[in-house]
Amino acid sequence: MELKELQKKVIEFRDARDWAQYHNPKDLAISLSLEAAELLEIFQWKDPQEVEACKSDPESRRRVKEELGDILIYALNMCHAFGFDPSEVILEKLELNEKKYPVEKAKGSAKKYFDTGT
Amino acid sequence: MELKELQKKVIEFRDARDWAQYHNPKDLAISLSLEAAELLEIFQWKDPQEVEACKSDPESRRRVKEELGDILIYALNMCHAFGFDPSEVILEKLELNEKKYPVEKAKGSAKKYFDTGT
Amino acid sequence: MELKELQKKVIEFRDARDWAQYHNPKDLAISLSLEAAELLEIFQWKDPQEVEACKSDPESRRRVKEELGDILIYALNMCHAFGFDPSEVILEKLELNEKKYPVEKAKGSAKKYFDTGT
Amino acid sequence: MELKELQKKVIEFRDARDWAQYHNPKDLAISLSLEAAELLEIFQWKDPQEVEACKSDPESRRRVKEELGDILIYALNMCHAFGFDPSEVILEKLELNEKKYPVEKAKGSAKKYFDTGT
C-alpha cells in the first residue's frame, strides 16, 4: 500500500477522535519512546537463542506486531505534525546513511565502524 | 511510494553492508529505543510554546526528519525480521485501536479515557 | 541511610533469588530504560499544570515513588556489576558537571547553554 | 556516604545554577529516559561475551560510570521534586518486591516467573 495512503488513514483515525489537540511534537516523541520500550520489554532478560525463538512464537509475534504498529502509527503522526512526506523521510535518511556508511568501509567490519563513528 | 518498495530499499541497504548478522530482534528493539530517545532529546526542557516553534525552525526540522528516518528504517527492518508486511502491521493496529478507543467514547475526553484505559 | 548499606540490601535481595545470573550489564541497562519509560508514562499527554498537580495527587505520588524505587535499585545493581561505589559515582559526576556547567556560565541562561553544549 | 547528604549536594549544584525552574517532573522523567538510553547505547550490538568484556574495559567503565552518575543525580532530583526521602524510596520498593517476588517462588525460575507476572 502507498505510505501516504496509510498516513491518511492514521490521520483520519486521529481526527475522528479530536486528538490533534494532544499531538504536540513533545508528547508524540514521548509516545514513540514509550512504545519502543514496550517493544524492547518483550526481549528483556532473553539470551540470543531465546530472542531468536521469539520469531516463531505466536504470542511474541502478536506482541511485536502490535508494538511495531504503534511505533509506525506515531511516526506517521509525527511526520504529519511537521508536514513531512513519510516516503521522503525514509529515502533522504537512506541517502545520508549511504554517505555515513559507504559500502566499502562498512562491509564486514560493522562493529568497529560503529565504534569509531559515534 | 509503496511501503513495501521502501522496505525493499531498506533491506538492500542492510544487505550491501552484510549487516543482517547484527539485526537480531533484541538489538533492533534497542536501536528503536535509542533513536526514539534522540528524537525526544530535541524537545527536552522545552515548554509548549518552544515545542510549537520547533515546527518552523529549520535546524529542529532537520533533526526531527533525520531521527524519524532512523525510526522508520529500524521499524521496517524489524518487520522484515519477523516476516511482517508493514502495511498490514499498520492496518491491523488501527483496527485494534478502533475497538480499544471507539469514537463515541474517546472523542473530546481523550485524557480521562487514557487514564482509565491503562 | 548510608548508600552502601542500601546497596547491600539490594544485592541481598538479588542473591536470595539467584538472580545474579540474569544481571548482565546489557539487560540491566535495558531494565533501567524500561523503568524510566514507566516513570515517563505518568506524565504523557499532561500539560505543565497537570504535571505540577501530580506532585500533590496521592495516586501519582505512589506511582512515581515506585518507579523511582525501581530505577534506584537497578542503578545500584549496575554499580555493583562494575564494582563501583555508588557514592563515588555521584560525587565524581557532580565534579565533572561542575567543569561542564560552571556557575558563571550556566546561571540564568540554562537553555541556551544546553543548546550550544550538546 | 549518607544518601540524604548526597542528595543535598545534588540540590546545591542545581540551585547554584538556578535550574529549579527547569526541573518539572515531566522534563526530569524525560532526562532519566535519555540518560538510560545513553547507558544502553554502550551495549548496543554487543553479544554476551562483548558485554561481559565491558566490565574490564577502561573506556567502557568510564562511560558506564558517567551515565550511572547522571541517572542517580536525576533520580535524586526527582525524589526532591516530590519531597521523597530517597532511602525510603528504595526500602519501600524492596518491601513491595519481597511480596511480588517471594523467595520460594522466584528462586531458580526467574524467567518463567517474570513471564507470568507481567
Image (tube, coloured by chain):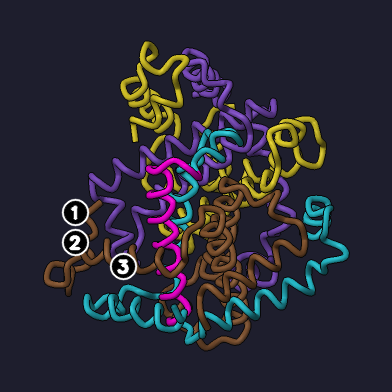
Chain colours: A purple, B yellow, C cyan, D brown
> Same chain for marks 1 and 3?
yes
Residue at the extreme right = C104
For the residues marked 1 and 3, what is the alpha-carbon distance in whole angstroms?
20 Å
Res D113 label: 2
Residue stretch rendered in magenta on the structure = C55-81
Q: Residue at 31% of width from left, 43% of height from top? A: A63
Which chain does the residue under circle 2 lie in?
D
x%, y% of residue A9? 49, 18
What's the distance in space between the residues labelled 2 and 3, CA to CA? 17 Å
Q: Which residue is drawn at 18% across and 68% down?
A: D106
All told, the count of numbered labels is: 3
Whether residue B112 is situated above or below residue C87 in the rendered picture: above
The residue pinned by badge 3 equals D94
Disc 1 versus disc 3: nearer the observer: 3
Give x and y (percent) for residue C21.
30, 78
The secondary structure type at the circle numbered 1 is helix
Q: Quadrant of residue D99?
A: bottom left
Q: Is mark 2 on a helix, strand or loop?
A: helix
* Residue appearing at x 41%, y 25% in the figure: B112
Residue B106: which disc? none
**Mark 3 and mark 2 in contact (Cβ < 8 Å)?**
no
Of the residues shown, which amino acid type is indicated by label 2?
Tyr
Q: Label 2 near label 1: C-beta < 8 Å?
A: yes
Q: Residue D116: which numbered mark, if any?
A: 1
Magenta span has C80? yes
Q: Name the residue at 59% across, 34% down.
A: C49
| Front residue of A40 and C105 | C105
Q: Mark 3 lies on which chain?
A: D
Spatial CA distance of label 1 from label 2 is 6 Å
> Does residue B41 appear left or right of residue B105 in this picture?
right
Mark 2 vs mark 3: which is more N-terminal? 3
Name which quarter of the figure residue C52 lies in: top right
